Image: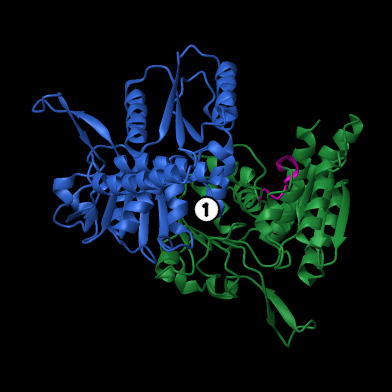
Chain colours: A green, B blue
C-alpha cells in the first residue's frame, strides 16, 4: 500500500502558486484576489471558508470574506453577487455551498460572472468542462487529476469506477477521466444509489473514485489487488477514545484494504487539501487571464 | 427480437408537433421558424439540411436556409450568425456540421444565441444538460431517450454501455442515462478507442448505445441475451447487388444478433428519423418560451 500524500502534494502546488505571485509582484502585475460569499452560520462552511482564506495568506493572495445572515433574500444575495462581479479588484470568488434552502442554488450560481467563477459551477464553465474546452475546472475533480498526475498513475485504458454522481465531484471527475487526455482515456463507469452489484463493479476496477460519504464502506474483499483508490468521502463518526469525541473517516476502511490496495489517498490529508490548492490555482489563472 | 421502429415513432412526434402548431395558429400565436446555416457543398450535409427543411414543411413550421460558399471567413460567418441571432422571426437555428477545417467550430457554436440554440451545443446549454437543468437537449441523445421512453424500456439499475464519447452523441447520452430521472438511473460505462476488452463489456450490458460508425461491428456472440441495442452508427458500404452500388449499415450486424437481442433500432429507420423530430421539438420549445 502506497499512501498518496495529498497534504504534501497540496503544499507543492501552493508553493508553486506562491512563486508565481512573487514573480507577478516583481513584474508589477496584479496580486490575485479571491473572495468568498458565506450565507448563514453553518459550522463546516465557516471552517472551509476559513481554510481558504488561510491558504490565500500563505501564497500571498489578497482575500475578502462577505458574510450574510441566513435571512438574506435571494434578490439581495444576487445584488451582492453583482457587486462582486463589478469589483475590478476581485479576480475570482466562490459562493460557499450549501446555501439556505429558501435560496435557489442554481439561480445564484448562474449569476456569478463566468470569468470570476473559480469554482467552475456556472453552466457555461461546466459545459466547457464537459466539452473538453479550457475553463475553470471544479476544484475537487481538478485536485484528483493533479494527485493522479503527480503520483504518475496510469489511467489510459484502465477501468475506472466513480461512485457518486454529484455535480461537484462524481459527474465532473467521470467526464474528465474519460476524455482523450494524458491523464484521461479511462473506461469510466458511474455508480450511484440505483446501482446494483456495486461490490462486483468495485472488484473489477483498476481505479476507484469514491464520493458517497458512507463511512468505511469499501472493504478489502471488494477491491482488485493493486488497484488505486481515491477517497473523497469525509464523515465524522463518534469515537469515545478520541479527545474530540469523534474522528474523521473516508469511504474506505483503510485497515481492511491495506493488504490489497496499490495506491490510496488517506482521509484526512488526501483529496481535501488539494481542493483548496486547486481553487487558488483557478484564482491565479483568472487573475492572469485579465492581465 | 423486437424492432424499435424509429420511423414510426418519429411520425408520432412530428404529428404531435403539427397539432401544437395548429393550436398555436388557432390561438394567433407565432408559427415556429427554424433556420439552418450551411457552409460549403458537402453532400451528406446538404441531404441532412434538406431533410430538416422537409420536416419543417410537414409540421407547418417556417424554415430558412442560409447557404455560404466554403471560402467564407470565420469573421464573416460570425457576422451572419449575429444577423440570425437578431432576426426576431427566427426561433431557433442550427449550424450544420462539419464546418470547413479553417473555421474554428467551437468559436462558431459559442456565437449562437443560447435561446435559439436548438442543437444544444452552446457551452451554456451543454452545461445545463450536464447539470440536469432544463435546456435544449442535443437532438440525437434526446431522440434515443424518446425511443426508450415510448418503447417502455426500463433503464433504472440496468448496466448501460455507451460506445463512443463524441460531444454530439456518446458524451451527452451517457450523462442523461445516468442522471436521476425516470428514464435514467442506469449504471453507465463509456467505452472509446482506448478501451480494452470491449467485447467483455458488451456481453455484460443490459443496454448498449453504439455510436462509433464501425459497420456491423457488434455480433451476436458479443451481447447478453435479451439486451437492448440502440444503433447510432450509419455507414455506407459498397454493395454491388444494390442498384445504388452501396447500402447503409449500422454498428450492429442485425442478422448475427437477431437470435439473442431483445430490442433493437434498425439502420436506417431507427435513431436517424428521431434526430430530426427532436430538433423540431426543440424549435417548438424555443418558440413557446418566447411567447
The residue labelled by disc 1 is A174
A222 left or right of A213? left
A175 left or right of A70? left
Residue occupying the far top of the picture: B71
- Between A140 and B273, the one lying in front of the other is B273
- Looking at the image, which residue is at 70% across and 42% down? A114
- Between A257 and B48, the one lying in front of the other is B48
- The quarter of the picture where the N terminus of chain A appears is bottom right
Q: Position of residue A140 (x, y in %)?
A: 65, 55
How many numbered discs, if any? Answer: 1
Q: Is A120 one of the magenta-colored residues?
A: yes
Q: Position of residue A116 (x, y in %)?
A: 75, 43
Q: Position of residue B272 (x, y in %)?
A: 30, 40
Q: Main secondary structure of the magenta part?
A: loop
Specify whether residue A188 is in view: no
Which portion, as a residue range, is magenta? A114-121
- Looking at the image, which residue is at 51% across and 74% down? A219
- Between B7 and B189, the one lying in front of the other is B7
Q: Is B259 one of the magenta-colored residues?
A: no
Residue occupying the far bottom of the picture: A240
Q: Chain of mark 1?
A: A
- Looking at the image, which residue is at 57% across and 52% down? A172
Q: Secondary structure at mark 1?
A: helix
- Looking at the image, which residue is at 51% across and 13% down? B72
A198 left or right of A95? left
- Quarter-wise, where is residue A254 in the image? bottom right
Amino acid at each position: 500500500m502506497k499512501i498518496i500524500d495529498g497534504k504534501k502534494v497540496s503544499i507543492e502546488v501552493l508553493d508553486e502558486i506562491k512563486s508565481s505571485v512573487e514573480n507577478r509582484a516583481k513584474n508589477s502585475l496584479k496580486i490575485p484576489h479571491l473572495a468568498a460569499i458565506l450565507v448563514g452560520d453553518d459550522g463546516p462552511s465557516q471552517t472551509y471558508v476559513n481554510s481558504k482564506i488561510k491558504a490565500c495568506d500563505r501564497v500571498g493572495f489578497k482575500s475578502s470574506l462577505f458574510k450574510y445572515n441566513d435571512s438574506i433574500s435571494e434578490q439581495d444575495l444576487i445584488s451582492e453577487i453583482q457587486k462582486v462581479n463589478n469589483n475590478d479588484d476581485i479576480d475570482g470568488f466562490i459562493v460557499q455551498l450549501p446555501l439556505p434552502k429558501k435560496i435557489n442554488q442554481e439561480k445564484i450560481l448562474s449569476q456569478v460572472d463566468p470569468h470570476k467563477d473559480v469554482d467552475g459551477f456556472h453552466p457555461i464553465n461546466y459545459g466547457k468542462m464537459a466539452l473538453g474546452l479550457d475553463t475553470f475546472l471544479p476544484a475537487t475533480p481538478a485536485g484528483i487529476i493533479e494527485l493522479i498526475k503527480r503520483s504518475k498513475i496510469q489511467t489510459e485504458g484502465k477501468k475506472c469506477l466513480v461512485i457518486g454522481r454529484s455535480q461537484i465531484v462524481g459527474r465532473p471527475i467521470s467526464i474528465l477521466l474519460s476524455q482523450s487526455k494524458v491523464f484521461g482515456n479511462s473506461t469510466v463507469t458511474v455508480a450511484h444509489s440505483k446501482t446494483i452489484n456495486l461490490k462486483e463493479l468495485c472488484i473489477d476496477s483498476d481505479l476507484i473514485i469514491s464520493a458517497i460519504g458512507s463511512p468505511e464502506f469499501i472493504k478489502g474483499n471488494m477491491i482488485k489487488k493493486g488497484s488505486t483508490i481515491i477517497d473523497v468521502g469525509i464523515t465524522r463518526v463518534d469515537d469515545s477514545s478520541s479527545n474530540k469525541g469523534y474522528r474523521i473517516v473516508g469511504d474506505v476502511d483503510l485497515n481492511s484494504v491495506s493488504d490489497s490496495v496499490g495506491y490510496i489517498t488517506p482521509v484526512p490529508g488526501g483529496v481535501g487539501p488539494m481542493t483548496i490548492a486547486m481553487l487558488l490555482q483557478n484564482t491565479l489563472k483568472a487573475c492572469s487571464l485579465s492581465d
